Amino acid sequence: MSKTIMTVDDSASVRQMVSFTLRGAGYEVIEAVDGKDALSKLNNGVRVRLIFADLNMPNMDGIELIRAVRARPAYKFVPIIMLTTESQASKKQEGKSAGATGWIVKPFKPQQLLAVVKKVLG
C-alpha cells in the first residue's frame, strides 16, 4: 500500500509546510483546501493512509469532515489527526467524539509531525 497522506487546511502556507515535511520523509501528499475539497478527492477514488485536518475551515470544518469520512466504510479506520490552533479540552472532546485519532496544536515542529505519523502508521 502506498504511503499517501492527505492534508486538509484552508491555509496554503500550512499545507505547504506539512507537504514539505512529509515529502521529505518519503510520503506522497495530497492537499485539500477544505473539508468539501477533501471529500471530493476521496470520492474520486484517492486512497490515503492518514488524514491531517484543520478544525476551522470554510465550507466544511474539521469536525464535519471527520464525521463524513467516518461514515464511509473504506475510511472507518483511517487515522485522522486534527492539526489546529484550537487547544481547548471541549474542542478536543468534540473531535474525539466525531472520530479524531489525535490532535496537534499549531504551530508545530516538523519532527513532531513526523513522530505522530510514525506512531500512527507504524
Image (tube, helix red, strand yellow):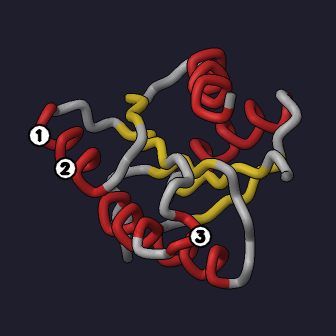
Q: Which of these two is toward me, 95 or 30?
A: 95
Crowding at mark 1 (Cα within 10 Å: few <14, some 14-19, many 20+): few
Helix, strand or loop for disc 3: helix
**Image check: 30 left or right of 28?**
left
Residue 63, placed above or below residue 40: above
Mark 3 crowd level (few <14, some 14–19, many ≥20, 10 Å Cα): few
Q: Is residue 16 left or right of residue 38?
A: right
Q: Position of residue 5 (x, y in %)?
A: 70, 49
Q: Are marks 1 and 2 in contact (CB under 8 Å)?
A: yes
Pick the residue in front: 77 or 111. 77
From the image, tell me which residue sits under label 3. 74
Q: Amino acid at mark 2?
A: Glu
Q: Secondary structure at mark 1?
A: helix
For the point 83% across and 28% down, the residue is 25
Q: Which residue is mark 1?
A: 90
Q: At 32% from the left edge and 68% from the top edge, which residue is drawn?
A: 64
Counting from the top left corner in percent of width and height, residue 8 is at 55, 57
Q: Which residue is under mark 2?
A: 94
- Outermost residue toward the left? 90
Residue 39: % across, % down: 54, 76
Taking depth in this image into account, of 100 and 21 the one nearest to the observer is: 100
Q: Residue at x 57, y 25 (%)?
A: 116
Q: Quadrant of residue 90?
A: top left
Q: CA distance from mark 3 to mark 1?
A: 28 Å
**Of the residues tagged 2 and 3, which is closer to the observer?**
3
For residue 101, which quarter of the picture? Answer: top left
Give whichever of discs 3 and 1 has the lower sequence position: 3
At mark 2, the secondary structure is helix
